[in-house]
Amino acid sequence: MEFIKGFTYGWMSRKGDFKKPEAKESMRLLKERTNTDYAIISLAALQDGAHTTVVDYTGEHMVSDEELVDMIEYAQSLGLKVILKPTVNCKDGTWRAHINFFDLDVPCEPKWKDWFKSYTEYQMHYAAIAQKTNCDMIIVGCEMVQTERKDKEWRALVDEVRTVYNGAITYNTDKYQEGNVKWWDALDVISSSGYYPINDWDNQLDRIEKIIKPFNKPFFFAEAGCPSRSNSPYVPNDWGLEGETDLKAQEDYYKVMFEKTKDRDWVQGFGLWDWKALLHMEENAANNDDYAVYGKPAEKVIKAFYATK
């Protein structure tokens, strides 16, 4: 697998957002300003809560199929490769890692089989779009920690996706959970979220390498990044951390992450988090404490690093 110089694009975009001229301009700027060559278009279906079984991918919270296909084709016209990442959120705000059901079916209680039926239909819908538009990879789930023990069900889902999609398939496990997935062998690529403390990269890389080596599969960090907020480099996964806006903290995090991973030849890329379809105004970047890097010093760090790959 070639090194993935990737960036997550369009997370939480709603119906109509990809039709806006600003969204295509954002995609163009992504390539121009960061040397990205893989746009990871990430979608957020919804289910009511962590213990409900219907995954809704048809509402106003999703970009339409038409505008998604148009954006994929636009990205490709810029010379970008596209990875499609259909994932799911809970309407009540519960993090998707907590989606969970009883392992034994109980009358009148929600069941794994019903959730996997709905979730598989969702994945199949976007796998067909990925095939139609020649996407280079599909990520069939993200950080769904409690579901990962359902080995048989996940293998069946991957098998179903392969009936309609011929490209590479991966699953994005959460930070620290690389050893939680026993079905990496069913996939083409191993990936995880690399939100590791700035002072702990060596330890975590040593740990991950030992876990993934027996599978003999390519690996990349399907997510990685840090808010531009004081103290965020030590807890980069905490998007709600309180602190002052600190562009240097984000810049330093990227410098260390790239330095620590550059000589680990098994780390074959990043899907950095994240690049909005509708960007903030560049002149307001100094006041933005989000993961976004547009107009911030970290953007130049990323561009320079990707230029070397």
Image (spheres, helix red, strand yellow):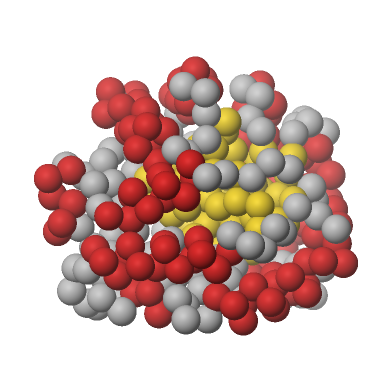
Q: Position of residue 77 (x, y in %)?
A: 49, 18
Whether residue 137 is visible: yes
Q: Is residue 193 left or right of residue 182?
A: left
Q: Position of residue 47 (x, y in %)?
A: 51, 55
Q: Is residue 50 above or below residue 220?
A: below
**Count of labels in the image:** 0
Q: Nearer the viewer, residue 295 or 76?
A: 295
Q: Is residue 196 above or below residue 187?
A: below
Q: Position of residue 291 (x, y in %)?
A: 34, 58
Specify the quadrant that holds the C terminus. top right
Whether residue 44 is visible: no
Q: Which quadrant holds residue 248?
A: bottom left
Give the residue drawn at x 40%, y 80%.
234
Give the residue drawn at x 51%, y 64%.
259
Specify the quadrant that holds the N terminus. top right
Give the residue drawn at x 52%, y 29%.
80
Q: Which quadrant holds residue 61?
A: top left
Q: Is residue 220 left or right of residue 155?
A: left
Q: Position of residue 31 (x, y in %)?
A: 42, 33
Q: Nearer the viewer, residue 96 or 52?
A: 96
Give the residue drawn at x 71%, y 50%.
170
Q: Is residue 122 above or below residue 94?
A: above
